[in-house]
Image (spheres, rainbow, N blue to C red):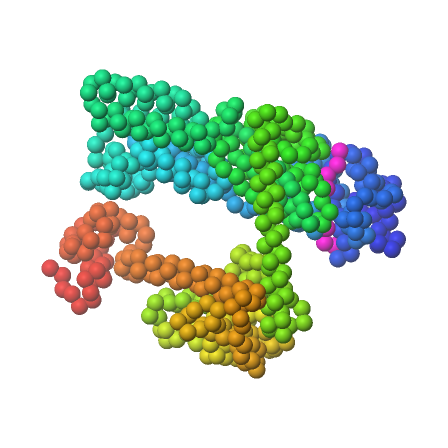
Amino acid sequence: MTGEQDNTAGFDAKAFLRTVTTRPGVYRMLDERGTVIYVGKAANLRNRLASYFRGDPGSTKTRIMVSHIADVQVTVTHTEAEALLLEHTLIKEHRPRYNVLLRDDKSYPYIYLSTQDHYPRLAFHRGSTRGPGKYFGPYPSPTAVRSTLYLMQKVFRVRQCTDSYFSNRSRPCLQYQIGRCTAPCVGYISEEEYARDVEHARLFLEGRETQVLDSLVQRMEEASAQLDFETAAQYRDRIQAIRRVRERQHVSGEGGDLDVVACRTQAAQSCVTVFFVRNGHNLGNKTFFPRTPDDAAEEDVLYAFLTQFYLEHDVPSEILLSHAVDDADVLAEVLRERAGHRVTLSSRLRGERRRWMDLARSNAADALGSRLASRAGMAARLDSLSSVLGLDTPPGRMECFDISHTRGEATVASCVVFGPEGALRREYRRFNIEGIEPGDDYAAMRQAVQRRYSRLQREDRPLPDVVFIDGGKGQLGQAREVLDELGIGAEELLPVGIAKGPERKPGMETLYIGDTLNERHLAEDTPGLHLIQQIRDEAHRFAISGHRGARAKSRNRSVLEDIPGLGPKRRAQLLKHFGGLQGVRKAGVEDLAAVPGISTKLARIIYDATHGSGSGAP
C-alpha cells in the first residue's frame, strides 16, 4: 500500500493515513530513490504511522527521517509476533539507514562431546548443533573454548584428537606423555575407567561440579586406604584444579542458562555487552558496537539488539536487561517459539543479579570509552596525515600494498584498507602473484595494483584517497605507471611510497609523495607517521600470513594429486590400502595394480610419479 505524492516531501501523509489498516504488520519507509530508509513493526499500523506525521514526531533523527520519506509500504500480518519476525528479515535484507543495525555474522563456538563414539572425544565446534553428541555453549570467543578444553585435558584427560588420528595409533602420543590423555587408543585405560572420566567431564560442563567432586573425593580416599598414594595424589590435584575453576567461573545462585545484556550510548555511539552464563558457569563476555542513528535511546538500541541477535543465535532461558524494553512480552513469545522453551526477559533486578548487571554496565561503559578515545586519536592522526601529504581534507579511505615471498616462492601481495574508524578488515584483499620471474618485487607490485584498481573501475566502486606502497621509488614507480594506464591521476588517488630506514628502524622511513616524488622525512613523534606505520605494518602482517598459507599448501600437496585419472576416491583407496604415501612409494607396479580400480597402466604411471619419471619398476 503506498501513498500519494503531493507535498514538499513527495508524500501525501493525510491521504495515506486515511487508507492504512489498523491491523498488525510491518511498514517500510522509502526515499525518493526507492531506497528503504527505515523498517518498523506495529500492533496497529495506522496508529503507529500516524505518530510520525501528526504533530512533533519526537527526536531529531525521526524528524530528519520523515523529511526524506517519499513512499511508505506496509505488509499486514496475523499477529504482532509474526510482524516482529518479518521486521527482522527486512532489516537484515535492506539494512536501512535509520534502523539500529547489528554487525554480527559469526556463528559462536561450542565444546563438542562425541557421546556416540566408543571412546568419546572433546573438541572445538562451530556450526550446526543438530548432529549426534552433546554441545556445550555457546562461548563468546574461540579463546574461551580453547582455554576450557585446555583445562579439560589437564583435569579429566579425555582425548581431543581426531578420529582418524585416534584409530591409526600404535603407541601413545605426546599428550599421554605429558599427562593430558590416558591413551585409550592403545588400551592403556579400561573402557570402564575412560567412560567414568567422560561422565565427569560431561557433568562438569553441565555445571554439576559437586557430583564430580564427591566422586573424586571418594576415589581419592579409596586409593589412600589401599596405600596407593600416587593415585590418591593425582585425584587430589584434580579436585584442587576443579575447585579453583569453580571459584573463578561459578555464578552465585545460578544453575541454569542466562545472558546478561547491558547497553550504553555516548556521543552518537552505542555499545552492547553480553555475558554468557551456561549451567551456572560464566563463559565470558562479548562486546558489540551496533550502527545507530545519532540520537538513538539506549532502550531502543537494546531492543533492536535483542531482536537481531537472538533471532540468529541460541536463546537461554533468561535474559537480564539493563533497560526495560517495549513489547517485551511479544519478543519473549517469539523467542520461546524459536527456542522451544520458556524465555524470560528481566530488567528489574536485585541481589546477585543486580551485581552481574552492574558488571555488564561497567564493561559496556569501559568498552565504549575506549572506542571513543580510539576514534578521537584516529581523527588526530588523520589531521596530521592530511598535513603531511598536503591534502585539503583528511583522507576518508586509504589502502596499502605489500609483497611477501621466500626466495621467490609463493609470492603473495596484500591490500589492506583503512578508514576514519580504523582498519576495514572485511575489505582486505590478497593476490596470488603468477607469471613473473621469482623474486621480482617490482613486477609483483605492478600486477597487484593493476588487478586491484582495474577491478574497482570495472565494478564502478569508489577509489581510495591515498594508496601507500611499501617500498621505495622502484615499487612506487610501478604503481604510478599502472595508475597512469588506468587514467587515475594523483589528484584523484594520491600514491605514496614508504621506504624503510637504515636497519629498518621505525621512525626513519622516507616518504615519496605523488607524481613529483616529493621526499619527506617525518619526526618520530608525528601522529601522521604513526598512522602510516600502523597501516604499513598491517599490510606486512596480512601479506606474510597469506604467503605462509600459500607456501604450506604448495608444500603439503601430494604428488598423487597431479596424476591424471587418479581421482579423490582412488587416491583415498590407494592411501588406505598402503597406509599412507610412504607405503605407496615402497610398492611395486604389481602391488599397485592389485588395488581395486587401479589398472596396470595407471599403476605404472603412479610408480613413475612417485619415483621419478626415469625410474624402472622392480
**Residue at the spot 23% in from the left edge and 29% down from the top edge:** 189
* Residue plotted at (63% across, 56% down): 376
Region in magenta: 34-43
**Horizontal and vertical percent for residue 29?**
76, 48
Quarter in which the C terminus is drawn: bottom left
The quadrant holding residue 500 is: bottom left
Judge whether 260 appears above or below 606 on screen.
above
Residue 175 colored in magenta in the image: no
Quadrant containing the N terminus in the rendered view: top right
Left or right: residue 418 compared with residue 44: left
Whether the magenta-drawn stretch holds residue 37 is answered as yes
- From the top left corner, tell me how far across and down residue 584 is, in percent: 20, 53
Residue closer to the observer: 9 or 532: 532
294 horizontally vs 497: left or right = right
Vertical relation: 485 (above or below) 364: below
Tell me where residue 608 appears, x and y as whole percent: 20, 62
Determine the main secondary structure of the stretch shown in magenta. Answer: strand
Task: Indicate left or right for 27 with 191 as reference.
Answer: right
Kindly indicate the quadrant of the structure image that contains residue 196: top left
Residue positioned most to the bottom: 516
From this viewpoint, is residue 27 visible? yes
Judge by depth and name the residue closer to the eye, 460 or 111: 111
- Residue drawn at x 26%, y 39% is 178
Residue 21: in sight, yes or no?
no
On the image, the x and y values in percent for residue 237 come to: 31, 29
Which of the two residues, 396 or 583, is positioned nearer the viewer here? 396
